């Protein structure tokens, strides 16, 4: 009797699995997964919503909403030395190139220049990390930043930088963070060069 019951249970289980399709819609919460979003308000060539991966274990959170704040390219781009355009970065968000020094060092340089936040991105298209989010971690120094920092996909960083340079713009205007919790994924105004 027990053997008959086990064979029957196994047969039913297989037939249910074969005929049942479960469709689970993807929600914005699935996409967000702890990431932060910002939107560029101008120039119009860049008016999209962009995704950031916040620093894992240094700096503050992106909890204060900044509206219409300048996004300024750091000079030097890698921000591993003293920042030369501190006047432009004061009260702005710094866009910084990845490499040469730690993420924390870059964030501290931006903070020392008066930046409200740091966005770090990969500008080297041949880098294996160009199309991936990087987990920005503390460099195990005794320092810590008091501003938030996040990692931007390389393709977005390259397009933002090249567009600002082409238009001879010192900055873009952004809102950060942007709450997309109740926005369906199909309604997010993501850059057309990305396929998320």
Image (cartoon, rainbow, N blue to C red):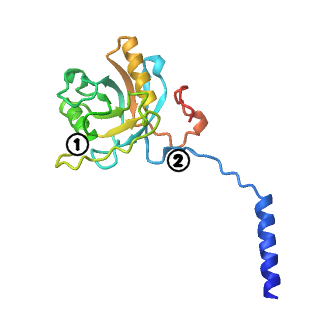
Identify which residue is drawn at 20% across, 26% down. 83
Q: How many marks?
A: 2
**Mark 1 to mark 2 CA distance (whole Å):** 28 Å
Along the line of sight, which residue is nearer the eye, 9 or 28?
A: 9
Estimate the x, y position of residue 166 in percent, counting from the top left.
40, 12
122 is higher (above) or lower (below) than 45: below
Residue receiving disc 1:
145
Q: Is residue 133 left or right of residue 78?
A: right
Is residue 4 toward the left or the right of residue 21 in the image?
right
Which callout, 1 or 2, points at the residue further toward the start of the chain? Answer: 2
Q: Is residue 29 above or below residue 107?
A: below
Q: Secondary structure at mark 1?
A: loop
Q: Quadrant of the C terminus?
A: top right
Q: Residue furthest bottom?
A: 1
Residue at image x 30%, y 40%?
148
Residue at mark 2: 29
Quadrant (top left, top right, bottom left, bottom right) of the N terminus: bottom right
Label 2 neighbourhood size at 10 Å, few (<14), some (14-19), many (20+)? some
Q: Nearer the viewer, mark 1 or mark 2?
A: 1
Residue 49 rendering spot, x and y as whole percentages: 48, 31
Mark 1: give few (<14), some (14-19) or many (20+) Cα within 10 Å: many
């Amino acid at each position: 009797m027990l053997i008959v019951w086990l064979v029957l249970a196994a047969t039913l289980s297989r037939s249910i699995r074969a005929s049942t399709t479960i469709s689970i819609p993807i929600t914005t919460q699935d996409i967000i997964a702890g990431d932060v979003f910002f939107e560029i308000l101008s120039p119009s060539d860049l008016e999209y919503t962009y995704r950031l991966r916040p620093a894992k274990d240094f700096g503050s959170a992106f909890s204060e909403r900044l509206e219409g704040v300048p996004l300024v390219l750091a000079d030097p781009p890698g921000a591993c030395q003293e920042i030369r355009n501190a006047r432009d970065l004061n009260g702005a968000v710094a866009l910084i190139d990845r490499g040469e020094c730690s993420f924390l060092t870059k964030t501290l340089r931006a903070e020392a220049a008066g930046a409200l936040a740091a966005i770090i991105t990969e500008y080297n298209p041949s880098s294996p990390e160009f199309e991936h989010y990087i987990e920005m971690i503390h460099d195990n120094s005794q320092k810590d930043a008091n501003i938030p920092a996040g990692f931007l996909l390389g393709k977005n960083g390259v397009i933002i930088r090249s567009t600002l340079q082409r238009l001879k713009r010192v900055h873009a205007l952004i809102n950060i963070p942007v709450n997309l919790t109740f926005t369906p994924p199909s309604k997010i105004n993501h850059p057309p060069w990305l396929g998320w």
